[in-house]
Image (cartoon, helix red, strand yellow):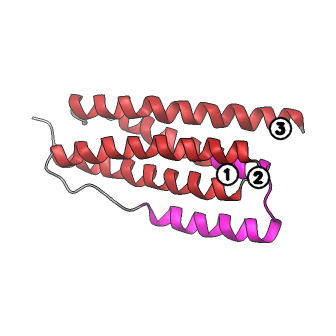
């Protein structure tokens, strides 16, 4: 019998990270000079909201209480990012670098969950479905960062 409390804890940990990602994309959209980047970040935030809804629904299905807040570390990170942008001014390259760093973090969180042998098969299937979207976001931001570095 699968341990639903482990499934719920794992899902809630992913939910907190996804909330951080949504917040990060929303902030980055505000910080971007380019309307193209702002639009891209807003689109990614919308996709992450769909991932969030899926994960929260799965926690509810398991009888758990879905997380609805991000992580404390992310709040501190957002404060730092806000401070940095206030001091250095807005720079699309810097914003993209921060976004890509966040993408590396969320991708590794999902990969760890997928490697967790204690997760029930049904929960793992939901995490895999959500990871497809997360990986697309990661790959897009990574490619964008590398293309901007090559152009500079």
Q: CA distance from mark 1 to mark 2?
A: 6 Å
Label 2 residue SS:
helix
Among numbered discs 2 and 3, the one appearing first in the sequence: 2
Q: Residue at x 54, y 42 (%)?
A: 44
Q: Is there CB contact under 8 Å for labels 1 and 3?
A: no
The quadrant of the image that shows the N terminus is top left
Location of mark 3 (residue) = 149
Give the magenta range.
70-99
Residue beneath the point at 43% across and 33% down? 131
Q: Position of residue 149 (x, y in %)?
A: 83, 37
Q: 122 above or below 103?
A: above
Q: Is residue 81 magenta?
A: yes
Which of the 4 quarters of the picture holds residue 148?
top right
Q: To which residue does mark 1 refer?
A: 98
Q: Predominant secondary structure in magenta?
A: helix
What secondary structure is found at the residue carrying circle 1?
helix
Disc 3 residue crowd, few under 14, some 14–19, many 20+, Cα 10 Å: few
**Can I make out residue 7 in this image?**
no
Badges 1 and 2: C-beta atoms under 8 Å apart? yes
Check if mark 2's residue and mark 3's residue have beta carbons within 8 Å. no
Q: Is residue 101 above or below residue 84?
A: above
Pick whichever, 115 or 79, lies toward us.
79
**Residue 33: x %, y % from top left:** 77, 53
Q: How many marks?
A: 3
Q: Is residue 90 magenta?
A: yes
**Mark 1 neighbour class, 10 Å CA radius: few under 14, some 14 to 19, many 20 or more:** some
Q: CA distance from mark 1 to mark 3?
A: 14 Å
- Kindly identify which residue carries mark 2: 94
Q: Which residue is most to the left? A: 1
Q: Is residue 10 left or right of residue 22?
A: left
């Amino acid at each position: 019998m699968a341990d639903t409390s482990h499934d719920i804890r794992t899902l809630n940990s992913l939910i907190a990270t996804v909330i951080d990602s949504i917040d990060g994309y929303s902030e980055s959209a505000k910080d971007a000079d380019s309307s193209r980047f702002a639009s891209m970040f807003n689109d990614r935030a919308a996709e992450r909201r769909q991932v969030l809804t899926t994960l929260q629904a799965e926690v509810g299905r398991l009888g758990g209480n879905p997380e609805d807040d991000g992580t404390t570390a992310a709040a501190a990170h957002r404060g730092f990012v806000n401070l940095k942008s206030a001091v250095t001014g807005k720079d699309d390259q810097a914003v993209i670098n921060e976004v890509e760093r966040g993408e590396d973090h969320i991708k590794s969180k999902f990969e760890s969950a997928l490697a967790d042998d204690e997760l029930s098969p049904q929960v793992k299937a939901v995490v895999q479905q959500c990871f497809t979207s997360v990986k697309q976001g990661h790959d897009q931001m990574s490619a964008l960062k590398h293309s901007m570095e090559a152009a500079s």
